[in-house]
Each structure stands twice: as structure tokens, then as C-alpha cells.
Image (cartoon, grey):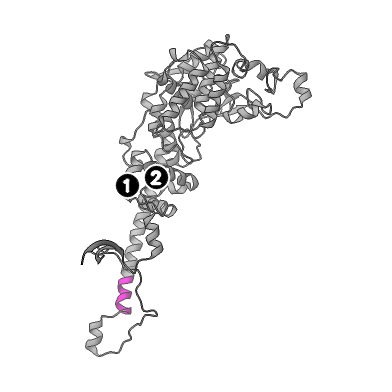
Amino acid sequence: MPLKLQHLCMNDIDETLQESQEGAFAPTDKQICDDVALLWRQEPSTEDLGISKLHSKIKDRHGNWIFSERKLKQILIEHNLLFTDETKLFTYADQVTALECPHISDKHLEKVELKRTGKNKFSLFAKKDLRRDEIVFYEHEPLTPILPLEKTSLAAVGRACSLCGQSLTQSSQFTMKNGLDCRMCSAVWCSKHCKKFDTTHSVLKHPMSRNKQVSASGWLTFEQFCKDNVMHAAYSVGIIHARALLDKSEGPRIKEQFEALRQISQILRIRAADSTNIGGTFDATTGAVSLEDKSIWNRSFDSFCKAFPGVENEIDSNDYMTHIGKFNLNQCEGQVFTLYSYLNHNCEPNVRYELDGKTGLKLFARKDIKKGEELLTTYVNPLHGVTLRRRELLVNWGFLCSCERCNKELASREKLKSQHLFSSEKTNNNTKARRKSSMKTSKPDLSELLKNGQEFNLEVPDEIGFGRRRKSVRFDDCVVAAVEE
């Protein structure tokens, strides 16, 4: 009789469990990183969980994922999400370079001075004693105003200012009376100042423009591409390039100041990213785009070149990625403020900023500052925990913060952990001792009962049958059997 081999399931296995196991799969590194980053965003306290508890959390969220605690730890270390050995983390802060900023107004330098702090490194220092809440400097305008990408659609139909993006509530009569509308399209400005300052509108937004340096149709295509892919940094680089190119009076200054700012290639920055998905902190405000799909970056550069014919003779794809990295390093709430961008970080800053009006930035002293003291701002929300702050700084600015506040909070957390472990071990030891003594009294040895001739009751199960069999090294849920054909 011929036989064949066949896989059979043991008869005491749960069918629903079998079905769920059949649908199980091993998630990719990106899926794990994205979900961990999302979990940390939804439940910030979980960022301080150990690997074992974090693994259980992720498994609870995705029951069909198959991955071990060891695999989870390895992935988190490789993607800068777990700092077990800080010396092995990928950082790029030492590769960031800058030049001394030209064309700074003397008025801005009344209380501060720009000093070299290393090779291609600069920072701002107090030129005199500053009192708490004193205005340090006031930048009335950013390097060039950048209309928020998400407001370009509203600006195109006249519902937001074409320059600053402020929502418009003025009447059409007021707009026409003050000449705040565009004669060639539906654009409207909120003030005469914004209309006068918007020197690129007539070239970028009017397809009939005959400017040889800019293709209006190419620009509108580039703008839509950035909008579709949430590439605020690329769009902003385009705005800055257009203003430097088209504004005859301010263009040279804008170009020189932008070139002097701190810079690093976006390609290097992406290597330090925690996640480019929702929940990640990498470029969270400007649109995170991973390096996995290189075609997006290539198409972005191609579209940029079509918007500015001949620009490829001046800027190649590597320069383009460096400009994007430069914008992300220096931007503050979507704008680049030249002098402010030279401030270094500290989790206990001595200065703070406020956005004044529509486009200005005021810098205030948070505490009394002595002459010669370095001015320090914070790049992240100071209310965040130490783990989240350090992760945000690592993935967005390329360094792991070791300021006095971070070191103090890390030491305090380690102390609490050690106290908790000691307390847990002590509790476990006491519990084991209690269990051992109680077991002796409640469950006497059977041989002693028989020897002494004492009566005792045997427990009879309520239901006769077999529950789920425990796995061992010898048994599995499926077996191979030889059956007759």
C-alpha cells in the first residue's frame, strides 16, 4: 500500500490560534521602528520601558508579528532609538560647518557679538550685561518670508495673504481700495507692506511671465510636487533661491547669508532619523522624507531644475540636498532668521524667542546674563522628558545632549531604577519565603500521610477533558504522519 507524508495538527490545539499563527509574519525593521516611535508619541511614559516590557507592548498591539526581544533590541540600537553604548551612535554634529555671517545690521549687534568657537563654528555671546526679560535683539524679517506650504491653496484663491499666509478677513472693497489684490490672478495681500515685499509673485505665479531665469509653469509644478509629498524644506529652498535670483536689491545679500549658515547634507541627516512616519521626531515640522525611495529626491531635483532653467549648471543634486539639510538645521517654525540661527542649544537656555506680528522674531533674556556669556536657546520643547529631548536632538541636529540638566536627570533616573530593582528583589524574596512555608502547611507530603494512616481527600476535577497541552522540546502543534493514499 503506497504511503504519503502529510502535516497534521494535534487534536487539542485551538483552531482560532492555529489560524492566527498561520497569518503571522516577521515585520520589517522600518515597521518596528515606526510603531515604536508612534507608541512613544501616544504614550510618552513607554519610552523609559525596558526591552522586555516594550516587546510585550508591541506584541499586544500587533499579535501577528513574530520577532524576539533580542531582535527588537538590535533594531532599536541600529536605528538610534536605544542608547546602550553612546560611543557607537551615529552623530554628525562635528561635520556641520558654517561661515561668519555677512551683512548683519549694527543695530542687531548692539548687545551681542558673533564669535568663532572652533573651525567653521560660530556662536553668539553677550556684549554687555543683560537683565532678565530684556530684549536682546529684534529681527523684523526672516531671511525671506516663506508662505507655509499648507496655505498655498488658500493663497491661490485669495483667502490667505500671498506672502505671510495670514487668513484674510478684510472686505473686497477694502482690498480694492488699497490695491491689495493682483490684477493677473486671484492673489490678495493683507497689507501694502506684504505686497511690496512679495517681489517674486509676478514671476512665480503668472504662467505668462517671460522671465528667462524662472519658468512659472515649472514652478507651479514644483510647488505641487512638494505639496503632494509634504516636502516643506524643498519648497522653502525654492522660495529662497527665487528671491535671491529675482530681487535685484536684496538678492545678493540673501544669497550670501544663506550660504554662510550652518550646513550638512540631508543625506547624512536621514541616516540619524528615528522614523519618517507619523510618531517620529525627524523633521516633524517640515516633512520627513526617507532615503529609501531615492526617486522622490531625484524627481524633486528634476522639478526644481525645470522651475529654474539652467540652475543645474550652478547647483547639482548634492548641492540641492545640502541646501535642504541647511534649511532644516536653521529653520525656526518654518522660517530662517539669520542671527537667531547662530545660537547653540542647551536644555536650560538663558534666552527665549517670541514671534512678533506676522514675520518678526524677538529674543529675550530668560535670566540675568553676564557680559561675555554665551547665549543659549533650546531646539526642543524643554518640558519633554530627558529621553525624548535627547532623541529629538540626535535625529534632528546630530548630537546627543550632555548638558548639566540632562546629566542630572539621567543620574536621577538611574538611581530610581536601582532603588526599584532592589525593592522588587526584596519583595520577591519575601514572597518566595512565604510561599514556601505556606505550601508546607497546606500541602503535606503524601508519603507522610500514608505512613501515619491519616485520612485525606482527593480533589476531583469539575470537568473531565484535556486543556491546551504545554509545548516541550519533544512536541509541537503539527506532526508529520504517514497515511495511506
The boundaries of the magenta stretch are 435-442
- Tag 2: Cα neighbours inside 10 Å, few (<14), some, or many (≥20)? some
Q: Which residue is mark 1?
A: 71
Q: Residue at x 52, y 28 (%)?
A: 226
Q: Position of residue 341 (x, y in %)?
A: 49, 23
Please tell me which residue lies in front, 407 or 323.
323
Q: Which residue is mark 2?
A: 32
Residue 473 in view: no
Q: Residue furthest front?
A: 1
Please tell me which residue lies in front, 80 or 424.
80
Residue 86 shown left or right of residue 249 in the figure: left
Q: Position of residue 85 (x, y in %)?
A: 31, 39
Using the image, tell me which numbered label, if any, was put on residue 329: none
Q: CA distance from mark 2 to mark 1?
A: 10 Å
Residue 347 in view: yes
Query: Are dots 2 and 1 in contact, CB under 8 Å?
Result: no
Secondary structure mainly formed by the magenta segment = helix
- Tag 1: Cα neighbours inside 10 Å, few (<14), some, or many (≥20)? few
Residue type, numbered disc 2: Ile
Residue type, numbered disc 1: Lys
Secondary structure under the numbered disc 1 in the rendered image: helix
- Looking at the rendered image, the quarter that the C terminus falls into is bottom left
Q: Earlier in the sequence, mark 2 or mark 1?
A: 2
Q: Position of residue 30 (x, y in %)?
A: 39, 41
Q: Residue at x 61, y 24 (%)?
A: 359
